[in-house]
Each structure stands twice: as structure tokens, then as C-alpha cells.
Image (cartoon, grey):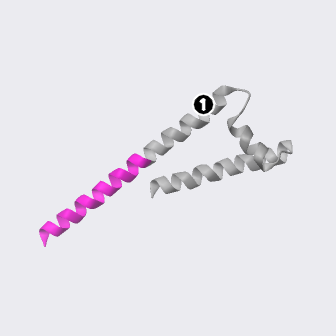
């Protein structure tokens, strides 16, 4: 569930940034989305991609930990009965 929320948040932030680029620089939606990754400064692209990978990995770890905790509590509940 954490990973799903991460994807929604990331996509919404990309769309919001593209919307601002569309309004400020009078780009089309496709030009604005393309300019998010293909900037003149390669460091900006690395920051975006590395941030996305780090966020995705943290959300996946959180989901796995929550799943294992839920599975363990179910097993303990079954052993008590």
C-alpha cells in the first residue's frame, strides 16, 4: 500500500510540475513532460531519477516489513487458539 501511494504521489508531482511548465513557458503537455527528464543540466535528471529510485526502494521495504508483521501476527493468533 505504501508503494501504491508513492506511485500516486510521484505521478501527481510530475503532472503538477508539467502543468506549471505548460503555463509558464507555454509548452504542450508532451514538451513539458519531456523537459522534466531531458534538461540541459544532466545533474537535474540524476537528482530526479535517484530520488525516484530511493523513494521506491524505501516504500517497497516498508511494504515488505508491514506484510511480514501482519503474517507473523496471524500465525501467533492461530497458535493461541
Query: Quick check: 33 left or right of 52?
Result: right
Label 1: how many residues lie within 10 Å, few (<14), some (14-19) or many (20+)?
few
The N terminus appears in which quarter of the rendering? Answer: bottom left
Please identify the quarter of the rendering in which residue 25 is found. Answer: top right
How far across and how far down the image is residue 74, in percent?
23, 65
Does 64 sit above or below residue 44? below
- Residue at the spot 55% in from the left edge and 52% down from the top edge: 7
- Residue at the spot 76% in from the left edge and 44% down from the top edge: 32
Query: Quick check: 46 left or right of 28?
Result: left
Does 68 sit above or below residue 38? below
Does 74 sit above or below residue 11? below
Q: Residue furthest bottom?
A: 81
The C terminus appears in which quarter of the rendering? Answer: bottom left
- Residue at the spot 13% in from the left edge and 66% down from the top edge: 79
Circle 1 SS class: helix
Query: Quick check: 48 left or right of 73?
Result: right
How far across and how far down the image is residue 71, in percent?
26, 60
Find disc 1 in the rendering and name its residue.
Answer: 46
Residue bounds of the magenta highlight: 60-81
* Residue 73 magenta: yes
Classified by dominant secondary structure, the portion drawn in magenta counts as helix
Please identify the quarter of the rendering in which residue 38 is found. Answer: top right
* Residue 33 magenta: no
Amino acid at each position: 500500500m505504501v508503494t501504491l501511494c508513492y506511485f500516486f504521489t510521484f505521478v501527481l508531482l510530475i503532472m503538477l510540475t508539467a502543468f506549471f511548465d505548460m503555463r509558464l513557458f507555454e509548452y504542450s503537455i508532451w514538451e513539458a513532460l519531456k523537459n522534466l527528464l531531458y534538461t540541459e543540466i544532466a545533474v537535474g535528471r540524476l537528482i530526479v531519477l535517484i530520488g525516484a529510485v530511493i523513494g521506491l526502494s524505501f516504500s517497497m521495504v516498508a511494504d515488505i516489513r508491514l506484510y511480514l508483521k501482519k503474517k507473523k501476527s496471524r500465525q501467533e493468533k492461530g497458535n493461541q487458539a
